[in-house]
Structure formats: structure tokens, C-alpha cells
Amino acid sequence: MEKKEFRAAWSLAAVFSVRLLGLFMIYPVFAAYARNLSGANPYLIGEALGIYGLSQGLLQIPFGLLSDRVGRKAMIVFGLILFGIGSAVAALSTSIGGVIIGRALQGSGAVGSVILALVADLTAEENRTKAMATIGISIGASFMIALVAGPIVANFVGVSGIFWLMVGLALLGIVITEFVVPSPRRVRLHRDAEAVPALIGGVLRDPELLRLDIGIFVLHAMLTASFLVVPGLLRSTLGLPAADQWMVYLPVLLLSVVFMLPAIIVAEKYRRMKGVFVGAVAVLVISQAMLYLAAGNVFILLAALVVFFSAFNVMEASLPSLITKVAPAEAKGTAMGLYSSLQFLGIFAGGIVGGLAHQHGGDAAVFALTGFMALVWLLAAATMAQPSYLTTRLLPVADAAAGDSESLAARLRQVPGVAEAVVIADEKLAYLKVDSRSFDAAKAASLAGAA
């Protein structure tokens, strides 16, 4: 990437990360904290943990579409202000209802889609995948750092202090956005990074994409529901208060990464994606069975956490890759937008149904619920089609070549390695799905007049 693109990628990754860092830090310490709030019960604790996913999921695509009109940076700053206000409301609240309102406000700052659109504005087509990968790495790192840091930070400043820290992180994100992130020369629609309303219906009717959307929904529902009870289990089985539970999360997460990496290499390099994917879902089922049957046993509990997070990390890495492989070339941004929305709605659903299960059936009921979710997902995953191992490429199209877009698309489909080609004349871009092992990039560029 060029220097300006590199700066854009890492500064926007920082904006993404400072927001997620605070949100994820709450997970391992929230259940114990919320029990002492007035009006709290297990259901409302689950609602408070997951409610930000509802506003986040519903507003992701609208925020992105609105940013096309009012500007990317303006929407990011607005979203971070909402996130900061919600964090302050949660910090000041002494009742579970107040925290629920604060968490819903936090989620209403749904800037993820806007950040990705701004990345697309600031990067050339050939470097966009690298920039998006930078964002993806920052999200994964934020999650792991937050689960370890949350108990440590809460030990010094309390959970209300974490909410105040989120206010500071929101302000830091605004400063980075205004003074570090480059300003785009112009804002325009990017079908590879943004949702296109006209394509949403087609994406929702695609059974393979819907199967993957259901997967991310279930995965994050399981994660949220689990954190309603796992901290309590660590306290009862290991005698670890919430402040010391980072000593469990750190080795568990490190081991999960060690187990994840070979699985991803086998899936991508050796093209065993379906086998690894279905295997990871089966491992999730096993982890929930372990927790349901013997969560009170310290060794089984720790083993189950390693098994769960290993499979979780495999799914977090492979699901976006599968979306890219399955989605039509011109609808990648729409498919990813819906995928992201379903991820957050899964967080909300996990908090709601996990809280209900916990209130009426205790810890075992939560794991019975998450195990059932994983089993349904396994049945859906087992019937998925073998992925095509195609990647999306964007090819600039010269003015002369863009005149007859249908003819150009037909010629591009004849290029070795090209499986799909759609030319959007107004954008002067060709959206290709290619097999990178056989794709003749030079010939495609020559046809598009870009060589």
C-alpha cells in the first residue's frame, strides 16, 4: 500500500478497535457487576449485556447509506458521540434499567459500516483487500485483549470505571478520525464494501449466504449467552473472583489461537474449507455438551473453554472468507453488510434467550440452549455446498471499454480463471470472481483498457 493508504488503514483500524475494546471488556465482568444493580434479575442482566447488538444490528446498513450523503467522517464522529453518551449513561446508572438504556445508546453508534466505506474511499482497488484485512486483524486482537484486560481493569476502577473508560475511548476515536484519518477526495458507492439496497433482496434469497448468516448469528448468540454463566462457574469451581479470571482467559485464548492456525491453513491453502467448517461447528457442539454435563469439574471446564474458543476463532476467521467466496461479485458489500447485521442481532438474541434460560433453569439450561443452537447449526452446515475458492477482484475500466458493459463482461468471462464478471459502467469498474491460481490478470486488464 502507498503511505496514505497505510495511514488510512491503520488509523481506521484504531478507530474500530478503541470502540470494540471497551465493548468486549465488559463481557467477562458484567454478570457479576449487574447482580448488584437495583431491579436486576438473570433475564434483565442478559438483556443488558446483549441489547447493544439490537441497535447496532438494525443501524449498521442505514448508517452506511447515510454516510454516502452527509460524509463518512461526520457519521463516524456522530456514532462515536452516541457511543460515548451511552457509555456515560451506563456508568452513572445504579439500576439495571439505566444500564440497558445506556447499552442501547452505545449500540446506536453503528459506525462499522461507515469505517469500511471510508477504507474503500481511501484505498485503490488493488490494495483494498489488504486494508480490510488490517481492520479484521484489529477486531480479532481487540477481542482477545479485551477479555484479558477486562477483569484487570475492573479490579482497579470497577465496571462503572470501564464504562467511563469507554467515554474516553470514544473521544480518542473522534480525535483519530478528525486529525489522523485522511479525508477522501470524494465519497462514492463501493459495491465491494457497502450495502446496495437494490441487492439486499437477492442476497437474502441466496440459500448459501443465508446459511452463513445464520452461522454468525448463532455463533455470537452462543458467545453472549455463555458469558452470562461462565464467570460464575470460574468463581465457583476455581475460587477465582472476577478480577482474577484473566489468568484463565489468557492461556485459554493463546491455546485457542495455536489450535486455530493449522485449521485455517488446511482450509485455505489445501482447499478443505467445508470439512474444517463443519468440523468446527461439531467441536462447538462438543464444547457445549462438556459444559452441560460437567461444568462443575475444573478440568472439564477449562478444557471446554479451550475447545469452544478454538472453534470460535476458526469460525470468526472462516465465515468472512466464505461470504467472499459465495457472494456474487457485485454484491460482496451487501452480503458483508447483512452478515455484520446478523452478527450483532445474534449478540442481542443470545443475551435475551440466555437470560431467560438462566432465570428459569440455571447454568445447565443456558448450556442446553447453546448446545441446541450449535446442533441446529451443524445440521445446516453439513448440507452446505462445497465452496468455490473464488476471490473478488476489482478491475478499473477505461472510458472506451465501459461503453458496452455487457460485451466487456462477456469477454472478461472468457479470461482464464474468471468465473463471474459484472461491469458497472457508471463506476467504471468490473467486479470479477476469480480463481487466483489460474487468473490471467494481464489479459483481463488489457480487455478493460486498464493495462
Image: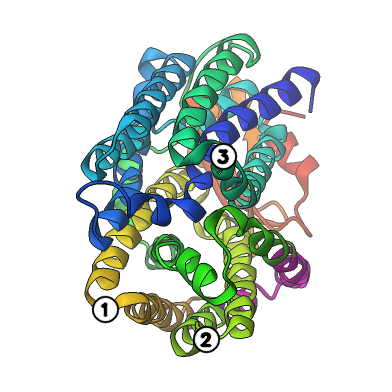
Front residue (pair 277, 412): 277
**Which class describes the residues within 10 Å of circle 3: few (<14), some (14-19), or many (20+)?**
many
Query: Label 1 belongs to which residue?
Result: 361
The residue most toward the bottom is 293
Dot in front, 2 or 1? 1
Secondary structure of residue under mark 3:
helix
Residue 389 in magenta stretch: no
Residues in magenta?
255-279
Query: Label 3 belongs to which residue?
Result: 21
Name the residue at 51% across, 18% down: 171
> Is the stretch drawn in magenta largely helix, strand or loop?
helix
Amino acid type of the residue tagged 2 in the rendering: Met
Q: Is residue 11 visible?
A: yes
Q: Position of residue 244 (x, y in %)?
A: 62, 57
Q: CA distance from mark 2 to mark 1?
A: 17 Å
Check contact, mark 1 vs mark 3: CB within 8 A.
Answer: no
Name the residue at 63% across, 49% down: 140
Secondary structure of residue under mark 1:
helix
Amino acid type of the residue tagged 3 in the rendering: Leu
Of the image marks 2 and 1, the number of the one nearer the N terminus: 2
Query: Label 2 belongs to which residue?
Result: 290
**Which class describes the residues within 10 Å of circle 1: few (<14), some (14-19), or many (20+)?**
few
| Image side of residue 317 versus residue 117, left or right | right
